[in-house]
Image (spheres, rainbow, N blue to C red):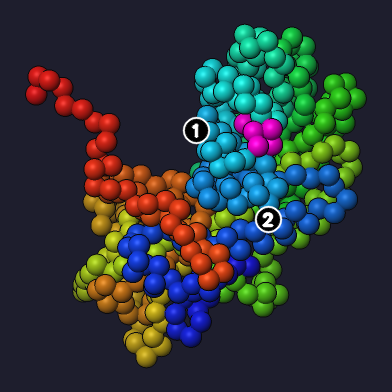
Amino acid sequence: MHHFKYTGDRLHCESVDLAEVARLYGTPAYVYSASTIADNLARLQKALPGVDARVCYAVKANPNLAVLRLLAGLGAGFDIVSGGELRRVVAAGGDPGKCVFAGVGKSGEEIRLALELGVFALHVESLPELERVNRVAGQLGVRAPVAFRVNPDVDAHTHAKITTGKSENKFGVPLEKAEAACDAAAACRHIRLRGVQTHIGSQLTSPEPFVLAVEKLAPLVALLRKRHGIEYCSIGGGIGIPYKDALASGSPEWWAKNDFMTPEAYGAALAPELARLGVKILLEPGRFLVGNAGVLLSRVEYLKRGDARNFLIVDAGMNDLVRPAMYDSHHEIVPLLRDTTRPALTADVVGPVCESSDCFAKGRRLQELREGEFLALMSAGAYGASMSSRYNSRRLPAEILVRGAGFELVRERESPDDLFRGEKLPPWL
Ligand code: LLP
């Protein structure tokens, strides 16, 4: 569920007319709904009754400081993957003690920062990393809190580029080697083994792979509880959202009619398995919390009609939202001003970037749109702004946070000078 809908013929985010936001701040611009994020978190926090669970939001999905502040204020912890993300959490007023630090390639400097700031745990992915964490902790004279990431070899049935829990992926240690890895961790002088972690992939739309992963981990958790007194198991993120019916999925009626995994269904399937583990459970959702809480606003530059195809050329590009180019992902595209009297148009919706893959949709049926009119790419709150780049020397977009009838600019559009800030000309040129 989310708070984007037409009021009359104007697309609103909560009580804010999005065309007004587009006119005020220009396009491309990301707009986020604070109430949607808060509702999503509240639903997930309630979805696992009887389980001692804590939500650690995966910052990579949307690291805007305002989003982090909002979630911190609602009691969330954070799943971070770099020193940069840790600094963001701190800058947003989040508690490092509620952060778990994941990633296969943590640098010595990042490990040091995490230990100095006192993260809840480092999620270690390999024995060489364990050695490095032990060494840095020794230098600081502390014991590093650690959980091992275990790869359960479960097929998440999602896009190949976002599956992580198969044995051929680079993440974690295989389940068969996890016991020995955890024993090694517990034997390190400067390591305190606190738990185990797993994450099998992203955009999962059924609970079965999650249940299978927990079932596969359960014997290891039982053994490590007994042998090393571990306190928690993190089951990662991965809850999917409905991209295809994005706008319609704002209403409870859509959910009643469609068999799409809800957080409640996810929780109901997992709660018995998780309760049996007898340890604290961490969840690391990214997309579920923010994905349907954001849209990317764009403006039509040209409608180029062709014999074989029409092209609707918009001012947002793959540099602003790379998911369609990178994962062939579907984002619903809707006009900010609906006009049912207009003819329909079938077009490829493309950006201005000089790449054929700068295409948001192929052969999409839309209301005919004209130069200067606005549209929204739905479900762009997760892995949208966070994956944006300056490719083609395009400025990073503005970001706006809505709550109720109010809205605030939470990231300015970059200035033209920002584009080459830090670049230097050598004296011999
Ligand atoms: N925990 C770990 C260890 C992760 O690697 C990830 C995502 C998450 C949690 C959060 O997963 P989520 O709940 O958002 O599915 N850029 C891709 C998604 C990459 C996900 C990477 N890891 C996309 O746009 O679909």
> Which residue does the image show at 43% across and 71% down from the upper left?
18
Disc 1 to disc 2: CB gap under 8 Å? no
Find residue 351 and report its horizontal and vertical position in percent. 30, 59
Q: Residues within 10 Å of mark 2 (few under 14, many from 20)?
A: many
Mark 1 CB within 8 Å of ligand 1: no
Find residue 243 and report its horizontal and vertical position in percent. 53, 63
Q: Quadrant of the C terminus?
A: top left
Q: Quadrant of the N terminus?
A: bottom right
Visible residue check, residue 67: yes
Label 1 sits on what residue type?
Answer: Gly
Mark 2 CB within 8 Å of ligand 1: no
Within the image, what quadrant is residue 227 found in? top right
Q: For numbered disc 1, what is the local secondary structure?
A: helix
> Which residue does the image show at 24% across and 67% down from the upper left?
301
Picture layout, residue 61 above or below residue 153? below
Query: Dot 2 corresponds to which residue?
Result: 41
Residue stretch in magenta: 95-101
Label 2 sits on what residue type?
Answer: Leu
In the shown orientation, is residue 173 left or right of residue 402? right
Visible residue check, residue 125: no
Picture layout, residue 217 above or below residue 410? above
> Which residue does the image show at 69% across and 28% down from the upper left?
121
Find residue 44 and report its horizontal and vertical position in percent. 72, 55
Number of numbered discs on residues? 2
Q: CA distance from mark 1 to mark 2?
A: 24 Å
Mark sitting on residue 84: 1
Find residue 163 and report its horizontal and vertical position in percent. 58, 43
